[in-house]
Amino acid sequence: MKTVRIIGVPMDLGGNRRGVDMGPSVIRVAGLHDQLNVLGISVEDAGNIDVRIAEEFHYGHQDRMYLEEISQACCRLSRMVSAAHEEDRLPLVLGGDHSIAAGSVAGTAAFHRKRNEKIGLIWIDAHTDINTPESSPSGNVHGMPLAAVLGLGPPELSQIEGFAPKVDPANAVVIGARSIDSGEKENIGRIGLRVITMKELDMRGMPAVMEEALARAGNGTAGFHCTFDLDVVDPRFAPGVGTPVMGGITYRESHLAMEMVFDSQRLLSLEVVEVNPVLDEENHTGLLAVELICSALGKKIL
């Protein structure tokens, strides 16, 4: 395993619940560095990128709240992720709300684009996050990053690094969705995005679902970015998340997914988002985030 570079993004502008900006801190406090060191992984912590807080400015248009500030932070994040790749480090991005994925994916895609390579995307989330400002019922930008990286907009996010899409929809898979807006359903159908809902996951099981996702994300690509929104996990196991939805994947299903990510040996960059300590219980969700990161980076039962 190459050296891991941790990049924190204390972002809570993308949603309507405060607190996820503390996510990078509570994941670190839960023992991330020590647990990675136990695995024999060398760790560099680049600290947190600068993100302005909501009290500093007005939220902007109702259909795209704080979009300008989020875009600026994502541009900074993209540059840091790309620099990590240039220095042969594996970027590990800690959120923060899921709007930051527009920057994380952009950085990995831009690095590989210079080498005439494509990347895949495995998006593990209770939500599909494929709204645009026109389709979003709330205007919350944390519901738009997948639309951005797949080229649907908004342009402030989709055009980071000057090209779109960052990922071909044929190489992208959403796993665990159980809350999808009507406008998102139209966007999913329009671009042919593969979305594996909780119903399908229940019927087929996590092993088959992950095998399909890994095949799609790895088909003709240099590898894939994996983004894991903790709200995909059932709130019984992950109570401290930005947007909890009952009926999520179990503790063991979460670990199995991450173990299979590692076994593929195709992981290019990893991201964990939406840990909200304000809503958590004794940092259970932060501790789970550390466990899942370790599974994705090589921790095994035997």
Image (cartoon, rainbow, N blue to C red):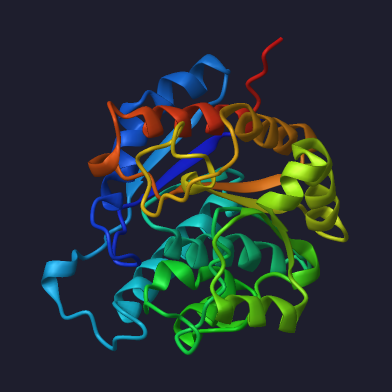
Q: Quadrant of residue 206?
A: top right
On the picture, is 273 further left or further right than 122?
A: left
Q: Nearer the viewer, residue 55 or 174?
A: 174
Residue at position x 64%, y 76% in the image:
185
Q: Position of residue 193 (x, y in %)?
A: 74, 70
Q: Is residue 120 visible?
A: no
On the picture, is 62 further left or further right than 179?
A: left
On the picture, is 301 further left or further right than 33?
A: right
Residue at position x 52%, y 77% in the image:
131
Q: Height in image: 35 above or below 48?
A: above
Q: Nearer the viewer, residue 70 or 181?
A: 181
Q: Nearer the viewer, residue 75 or 184?
A: 184
On the picture, is 173 further left or further right than 229?
A: right
Image quarter (top left, top right, bottom left or bottom right) of the N terminus: top right
Q: Is residue 225 visible?
A: yes
Q: Position of residue 184 (x, y in %)?
A: 59, 76
Farthest residue toward the top? 302
Q: Position of residue 162 (x, y in %)?
A: 56, 83
Total numbered labels placed on residues in the image: 0
Q: Position of residue 263 (x, y in %)?
A: 77, 32
Q: Nearer the viewer, residue 62 or 181?
A: 181
Residue at position x 37%, y 73% in the image:
140
Image quarter (top left, top right, bottom left or bottom right) of the C terminus: top right
Q: Quadrant of residue 152?
A: bottom right
Farthest residue toward the left? 55
